[in-house]
Structures are given as structure tokens and as C-alpha cells.
Amino acid sequence: MASDKKFKPTSPNVQWLEDRLPILGLVYGSLGAGYNAPRNLNYWWNFGSLALFMLVIQIITGIVLVMHYVPHVDMAFDSVQHIRRDVNYGWLIQAVHANGASMFFMVIYIHILRGFYFGSYKAPREILWFLGIIIYLLMMATGFMGYVLPWGQMSYWGAKVITNLFGAFDFIPFIGDGIVEWLWGGFAVGQPTLNRFLSLHYLLPFVLIGVVILHIWALHIPGSTNPLGIDAKGPYDKIPFHPYYTAKDAFGLGVFIIFFASFVFYIPDFLGHPDNYVKANPLVTPAHIVPEWYYLPFYAILRAIPNELIGVVAMFASILILFAMPWLDASRIRSLRFRPLSQFFFWIFAVNGLFLGYLGQKAPDDILLASFDVTDFSRVSLTYYFGYFLVVMPLVSRMETTKPIPTSIAAAVLEANKKG
Amino acid sequence: MIKNINVKGLIATVVSATMLFAVLNANAADPKAMHPERNNYKSAGIFGKWDIPSLQRGFQVYQEVCAACHSMDLVAFRSLSDIGYNEDEIKAIAIEYEYETIDGDGEETFRPGIPADYFPAPFANEAAARAANNGALPPDFSTLVKAREHLGFFSSTYGEDYIVALMKGYEEELPASAPLGFELPEGAYYNHYIEGNAIAMAAPLYDDMVEYADGTPATIHQMAYDVANFMAWASDPTMQERKQMGLKVMLFMFFFVILLYFTNKRVWAKVKKGEDIDPSKI
Amino acid sequence: MTKHDDVVEERRNFLYLATGAAGAVAVGGAVWPLVDQMNPSKDVLALSSIEIDLTKIAEGQSAVFLWRGNPVFVRHRTADEIAEAAADDAAEDLIDPENDADRVQKPEWLVMSGVCTHLGCVPLDQQGEFGGWYCPCHGSHYDISGRIRKGPAPSNLPTIDYVFLDNSTIQIG
């Protein structure tokens, strides 16, 4: 196998730096010509670098926004309007940050589904997978707190609903009763809550950076998997990350930016909720309290279960179950390309996820078809969701007939070129 | 990837997506409120621009009709330069308003407005506003058009279209289309377009209510159209700048992505075809 | 290497150069708003000029106004004070020589910054040995034209830009 090249600077000055702080060697060895990746990665592999790009964008725009934002219940909403109206390019920076959150989640969902499809969670990448789930959980916490900051109606009432959920844990001895008040810093969502949410919203992205570094480190030990799911063994299976994947990532980034920009410049409020243009009012409840779109599937799961505690547990379980995937899926074949039956169930899982999201933004008693309402459909959907992990994966992975896998990556590339 | 698509998986996706779509549209249920029709605003679309004459007429309607009850706290007089007023005109507008201040002796007094001031609220506080309006609070106009917008995949309602429809959508008597058993609450008026069909505000516009400075006939539709346009500007003053910058960014990015595409293609040329592989060694 | 290879290489290099240049433009375009947002916003700029009603200041009186976060002194000088200021043009001990006529547009209205040129304190009116202002922080004395006459301050109280909108109103900034 083409082994990773060592960093050999030609300039004695660069060598001088390298002897004292080998940072250039680190860059060379992790995303330069000194790091190798499988030669057959397709565009689904771009989404990791897109996610890193979005993290950086959110941090930069976020730090700039905090220069103008005021975390006080009487001034927060107005300060956001001040940013949009008076701060130079404030409207642009705010639109990038608000839509950037949605883009970040879009990219991450595709990145995760890539992991499902191509078996990225399987040995030896289990810890890589775990770190990814932790990143996702941190993103959800960060996004939730960030949405509260503009202090619109949805900000306030979303905060109220979600923090109230922790009241389901009041059975815990000693601390149970005080959890929600501790979160709020008072008897309801209010000034203390807003202040601490800003502080934590500023903090968590930097915690995220740390976990992302671990995530990339854990990736670089075995290296990336590839669409065929077979290990890269031979001398021609891998190619240097630079220039091949730097160029491909740059192209993918360009296309993504066009997509991102079309939201920022033409439909900046499409993914938001109009009620957040109304100042928060603790005495007036909005007609429909809905979280941002990226939380909708979990919101649907939460609401579908009549018991509050079980609903909260199910909501968290729907994410935590991903930790068990390396063991639920017993197949020795990584990529669903060679597992047609598993692939069939995977596609239904993906559409089911979208459907759960659709259900999450409807009122629970809306009739959808015949006499079945949103709650009925949500219950069916969440059954498939958990069933996919707990029933489908263990059974199908053990029983299905798989297609034959190629002998090597290089062989597969030559095969494909002969045919094409 | 095309060669590797699993047929069963594809069928599963298509079938479930179709079922999904059917469910989504099965209950295009009777909306409780009517859907507002689209007006032809020059600000719509990717090349949208502010219609300055209409915005100035709308401002006149706001000042002469709406400002009696509706505040616009976050809009400053200086922003009116966006809608075609120069510095002197803005000073003249601002000076008509009074603001509380403290004089040299610590006594409360009034001073004339300056361009940096914000439109003053008609009522001192929420309680006063409610007391003067049968317990209802006239909403602030600063972000109202954005708050009434509903953007969707299949159909969208723009806030300004909702406002126009609302202005024109009053009925003096309960119409035949009202839901069965509908009762109008005390002090409310029937309107086709508001959620719940009952609105606390009486129909605010009547024909020739204002005399437009530019001579345009002030029909109810015209005034509704103009004031909704003005309110749309108040809610989103950077719309034109945003779309103009968007055009530049999109054109540049398309050009840049084409360069990146060919760069990527060039970088990958040999490896893509597997020309670097020695078949005897794999 | 054949000539054809040379041509191909040239084309490739040009493509890479063009892409790199476009990338630099993109980064520059993205960075500028992030830098410019720290410049004063529109509401701050709106208060960057103020109008002062001079009819409220009687002869022999001074007034202080806050402009761009700092004090501005406006004094309605009496005829005696104007004469004194003009006479002191010729004083030998002027630390920062300047004619009074160069410091005013109309001699009865003295409009200047109220920030001591030593270390930024606000001088007190009608105090000091020169009939003008006295800065208590380190003992600078300014005369009835705002010129530094004694003490550690290096220069006269700065004059600022203003215009007479009419006989009774000035606009600063």
C-alpha cells in the first residue's frame, strides 16, 4: 500500500521551524500530500469537509454578531433588528448565521446517512462513530440555545417547552424537583435563562472544535472507508489527499456555497418561522409551537408518546441508539451496495425520517388520511424508526444474501474503466 | 453510482415518497381563513426593487391613518432616505414630532424630533393602547409583514399580500361562506383573511380617505397596496441591497465553480482512468 | 518533454492560476463585511452631527454639549472678552501660537472641543488665571480664546468643524 509520505522541507528555514514546532509537518501529514485516502471516494465523502467549513463559518459569524447583540429580555429582539438594519453588512452576517445553522444540520444529516449506507460505523471505526454522535448532540444543544437568543415568540416558547421536558425527571431523589428551576435560573424562562444560554452558546462550539479534532484523529488511524467498503490494501488503492481531495473538496465547497447563498440572498426566512418576528410574550402562546426543522423528527417522536417521561426517554433514545449500531449490524460487509435487502430497508428508513420531520410540524390532531391523525402516523413512523435498529438491522444483516465484493479497490477501478 | 443503484431500493423510495406526497396533499383541507391573492409588487422575485412612489404613498397612509394606533418603534426617520426622501425632507418630517426631554432645571419638557429619532408610539404603554382599543393591542409595524409571512414548498403567502387582503376582506354581515355555527365575539368584526375570521380592528380604509401628493386616486385597494408595500419595507429595509448583492455573488460563484470544476477534472485526469495502476502489482 | 506537453502544462498552470486568483477574490469578498461591521453603524453615524440652538446661551455664558461622546464648549463672548482674546494674539508666552480670529467664525461665538490636550480631562469654565478655563487634573490654564497659556498641555483646545445654519443655529459634525 502506498505509505504516507514524510514531510521533507527543502528550505533550511522551514526545517528550523519544523524542528521546534512540527506544525507544517502536521498539516502535510493530515491533509497534505503526506496523507493518503482511498482513490475511489465519491461525492458523499465531501460532506465531512463541508461540515467543518460550516462550523468555522458559524463561529466567525457568531463572534461578530455577539459584538452587537444584547442578551437582555427587553433589548435582545431590538438588538437583532439593529444588526439587520444599522450594522454595516449586519443583515448579511445575521442571514449567514441563521441559515448557516440549517446548512450545518443539512450537511450533517447527509454525512450521517452516508455513514449508515457505507458502513462507516463498523469496526475499526466505532470510536470515530461515537465521536460523531457526540458532535451531533453538541450541535443540537448549541442550535437550541442559539434559537432562543433572538427572543421572539418561538424562541421563548420553544425554550419553555423543551426545558419543561426535564421536569419529567422529577422522580430522581434529591435533585429531581429542582432540575428545571436550576436550568431556568428562576421560576420560568427569563433573563437568567437568556444570559446563560448566550454564554453556553458561545462556549459549546469551541468544545465542538475539540471533539472534531478527536474525530479527525480517530479517522486518520484507519483512514477513510470507501464506497466499496473493502479495506485499502494494495499499493494502488490509495492516493495522496493533496491535490486530489483538496481539489475535489474545493469544487464541492463551491457548489455548496451556491446552494447556501441562494438561501441567504433570496429566501433568508424560508427555513425560519414567522412567529419569531414577534417579540417574546410570556402571556400569549403561539397557535403552533414548532422547533426548527432539524429537530422536527425528534419532536414528532416526543409528542407521539402519551407518557411524558417515556416520550422524553424515547426522544433521547432515538439518537443514543446510534451508539449500538456497530453491534446491531452483524454483517461482515460494510457497504450497502452489496447488501440489496439491507439497502431496501435503508431507503425506507430515510424516507421515514423525512416523514417524521413532516409530522413534527403539524398539529398532533390534524387528520391526514381517512380518520387517522398525525399522532397515529407518528406512532407508526417511530415504530419503524426503532424497528430499523432493533429488528431489521440484527435480523437482515445475519440473514441476507450479499453480492460478491470486489477483490481490491484498484481492481474495481480498472474494471469500471474497462466497461466505461 | 448510477451503475450501483439497487433497483428494489429505488422502488421502495419512489413508492414511499409517492405515499408521502399523497398524504401531504390528501387533506388540502378547507382553510379556516381564505388564502390572500398575489399582488404585483416590484419588490418580488430575484430582481426585486423598491417601488419608490408606492412606498411614499404608503408612508403617507401610515402617517395619516395607521399611526393613530400602530407604533413602528424600530424605524428611524433617517431610514426614510431608502424611500427617496432627502436630508431636508427627512428633517421636515422629524420636526413635526415631539419627544420628551428634561430641561436645564430638571423639568419635563418637549423637544422637536431629529432624523436620528425613531417613530414615536401613539400610546405611552401597552395598557394605554389596550384601553383605547377595547382591550386589543394594535401590533407594532416594524416587523409585522415578516410576522405574517408563510413560505412553503408548494405555496407561499407573502406578508404584504396578506395585509392587502386583510384591508379589503371585511364583511359587514356574516357571509354564507362562514363556518357553521360561527359566532362573532363582542366588539369584533368579520374578516375573510384573519385566522379565526374575527378581527378587533374595524375596517380602517375607505375610498379617498387620503389625498395622495402625486395625485393617484386613493381607492381602498390602492391605499392597501401602498401601505402594505411601506410596511414590507419597514420589515425588511435591506431587501434590494440583499438581492443586488445576491446577483453579484451568484454570477461570481457560477464562474468560480466552473473554474473549480475544470481544475478538479485536470487534477484527477490520470488517476480517474486508473492510468497510474500497474495491473501486475495489484 | 514535447512542445505539446509544454502547451498542456501552460494551460494547466493558467487554469490553476485563474482558480487561485478567483479564490483570493472570494476570500477577500467574504472578509470585507466581517471587517466593516466593526465600523460605526448607521445609528451611531446618525448622531454624529448635532444642531445647537444658540438663542439659549446668553451673552457671557458658556454651555457644554455632548457630541460623539465628548464635550463641546460653546461660549457667547462679550465684547470685552473678544477684545481681550484679540489682544492676546501678540502675547509672547503663547505655548501654541494661534490668532483668535482663526479660531472662530463669528467672534462672539467660541465653539471648541472641551477635552484638555494634555491627558483628556474636561477643563472647568470661568476659572484659572487667564479668564478662560482651568483643568484641575494637572493644572493647565486656557485663555478666553481656548489657548493654552500655562501648564502641561501642549496645544490649544481643538477647534471643531461647524456651520451656521442660520444666525441662531449651528450644526456640529
Image (cartoon, coloured by chain):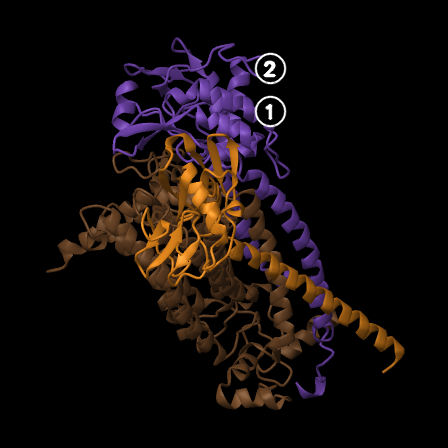
Which residue carries the number 1 mark?
B53
Chain assigned brown: A
**Residues at marks 2 and 1 touching, judged by CB atoms closer than 8 Å:** yes
Chain assigned orange: C
Q: Is residue A46 left or right of residue A142?
A: right
Q: Nearer the viewer, residue B91 or A91?
A: B91
Q: Is residue B83 above or below residue C159?
A: above
Q: Position of residue C56 (x, y in %)?
A: 37, 31
Q: Position of residue B257 (x, y in %)?
A: 67, 58
Q: Is residue B158 above or below residue B217?
A: below
Q: Residue placed at 38% from the left, 71% from the top?
A: A327
Chain at tag 1:
B
- Name the outermost residue toward the left: A174
Q: Nearer the viewer, residue B103 or B156?
A: B103
Say which quarter of the image contains residue A215. Answer: bottom left
Q: Is residue B195 above or below residue A105?
A: above
**Spatial distance from mark 2 to mark 1, Cα to Cα?**
10 Å
Q: Is residue A303 above or below residue B128?
A: below
Q: Nearer the viewer, residue A20 or A265?
A: A20
Q: Secondary structure at mark 2?
A: loop
Q: Position of residue B281 (x, y in %)?
A: 68, 88
Q: Quadrant of the N terminus of chain A?
A: bottom right
**Residue B216, numbered circle:** 2
Chain at tag 2:
B
Q: Amino acid at mark 2?
A: Thr
Q: Amino acid at mark 1?
A: Pro
Neighbour class for label 1 at 10 Å: few (<14), some, many (≥20)?
few
Chain assigned purple: B
